[in-house]
Amino acid sequence: MTMNLDHEELHRLLAALADSDIQEFRLEGEDFCLEVKRNLGVSSDSIASSRIISSDESDLPLPQVKVETPPTPSTPPPSVPGSRSDLVEVTAPMVGTFYRAPGPDEPPFVEIGSKISTGQAVCILEAMKLMNELESEVSGEVVEILVENGTPVEFGQVLMRLRP
């Protein structure tokens, strides 16, 4: 059986692993091997490490990444203020780092009040050193930007709201 994973499938797999309590995971294909190991100890911090072994490269250890797990609140988090049914929410399609501009010295893709069209880039999500432009699915006006530049985001997290 031949196994091929594209970039999006790999992100979905890693997001699913991040949301689970699986401590070790190994996936082997014809020309690759992916290993993910986590220490989900008692502390609120955990260490995750992974490595990819390729048939044409030697064992490539990736740096250990510190994953901070926020403590579980005893009460449910408050709903996001200003959530209205007439607004369209732009959500993160993957876990990554949110960037408002294409580069550090460049202007943001959008600001509050910006008029945007369908297919226009509104931000970048960096995941596994790959920059992924998010494009608007609707035309409208940006009314809220809910995430600070350079902030890690979760799958499904609301990034901004648009008035169509």
Image (spheres, rainbow, N blue to C red):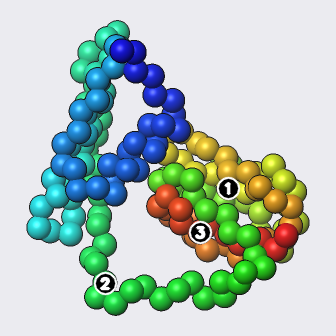
- Write the residue at 23% across / 56% down: 21
User: Which of the two labelled residues, at mark 2 and mark 3, occupies the earlier sequence position?
Assistant: 2
Residue with the most extreme front position: 1
Q: Amino acid at mark 1?
A: Cys
In the picture of the structure, the residue carrying the numbered disc 3 is 158
Q: Percent x, y for residue 144?
A: 71, 76
Q: CA distance from mark 2 to mark 1?
A: 30 Å
Circle 1 SS class: strand
User: Which of the two labelled residues, at mark 2 and mark 1, occupies the earlier sequence position?
Assistant: 2
Q: Amino acid at mark 3?
A: Val
Circle 3 SS class: strand
Q: Nearer the viewer, mark 2 or mark 1?
A: 2
In the picture of the structure, the residue carrying the numbered disc 2 is 73
Sort mark 2 into few (<14), some (14-19) or many (20+) by Cα contacts within 10 Å: few
Q: Percent x, y for residue 110?
A: 77, 63
Q: Amino acid at mark 2?
A: Pro
In the picture of the structure, the residue carrying the numbered disc 1 is 123
Indicate whether 11 appears above or below 29. below
Q: Quadrant of residue 56?
A: top left
The quadrant of the image that shows the N terminus is top left
User: Which of the two labelled residues, at mark 3 and mark 1, occupies the earlier sequence position?
Assistant: 1
Which circle marks residue 61 in the picture? none
Q: CA distance from mark 3 to mark 1?
A: 12 Å
